[in-house]
Amino acid sequence: MRTAVVDRPIDVSALVAEVAAAHNGALSVFIGTVRNVNDGRAVQAIEYNAYAPMAERELGEIASEAAAQFGTTHIVIEHRTGYVALGQASVAIAVAHARRGPAMDASRWIIEQLKVRVPIWKLEHYVDGTREWTGQAS
Amino acid sequence: MNLDVLLFASYADALGAPAVRVTLPADARVADVVLAVRALSSGAALPERPLVAVNHRYARPEQLLKPTDEVALIPPVAGG
């Protein structure tokens, strides 16, 4: 298991390699990316801001809880901070398990937990030059 | 005791600083920090009951504080 808040691009293939193992028949990857519109406004990029030590701690707790609940320790979570351009990954989760069901369920559970617990915020930069902190679950 | 309360995102913008200092009685609880911050100039822009973290964990309003605690007000999170 490994979790991190990082200020550089996420290397998804490295995450996949990290959780892969011969006894795992399933490997589920979730990638959250910056999309070009939110609430009808054209987005240029998102700047992610984290309370880093708490975000790291919370991500670690989520990974530990997922390990206990879904029965695998082959879990890696990385979340970006700083300026993330359109289409780039802001978060990536890789989970490997012997079976596909728990691998996919764990990946879904982790992103939902992350969205409500981890102290990270987005400052959306719009194409029209304005910017705004966006609220929960956007 | 004096506590430096960390602020983030919209809360930091509202108070114009990434941290504010508040003076509290020795037996202060988490709820007292919120009252003290909301009493500062522009502090009323914050919600009445924001999430609060103490030493990197979410804390309940009745939790007692020590001068060495790291206290932060947590705006609605928006990761992912």
Image: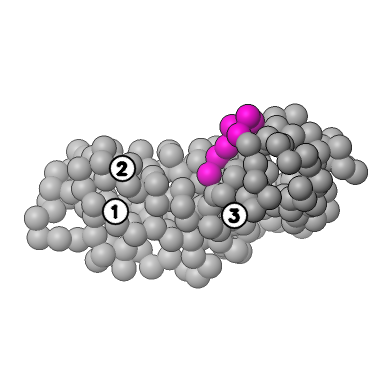
Residue A135's quadrant in the figure?
top right
Instruction: Give the residue displayed 55% in from the left and 49% down from the top.
Output: B56
- The residue pinned by badge 1 equals A75
In this view, the residue in front, A101 or A53, is A53
Residue A47's quadrant in the figure?
bottom right
Q: CB of mark 1 within 8 Å of CB of mark 3?
A: no
Q: CA distance from mark 2 to mark 1?
A: 8 Å
Residues flagged by tags 1 and 3 on a common chain? yes
Mark 3, Cα crowd under 10 Å, few <14 / some 14-19 / many 20+, is some
Q: Amino acid at mark 2?
A: Ala
Instruction: Give the residue displayed 25% in from the left and 41% down from the top.
Output: A68
Instruction: Give the residue displayed 39% in from the left and 58% down from the top.
Output: A3
- Give left or right: position of A13 versus B56: left
Q: Earlier in the sequence, mark 2 or mark 1?
A: 2
Say the numbered circle drawn on residue A51.
Answer: 3
Q: Which residues are magenta?
A: B57-63
Q: Earlier in the sequence, mark 2 or mark 3?
A: 3
- The residue pinned by badge 2 equals A66
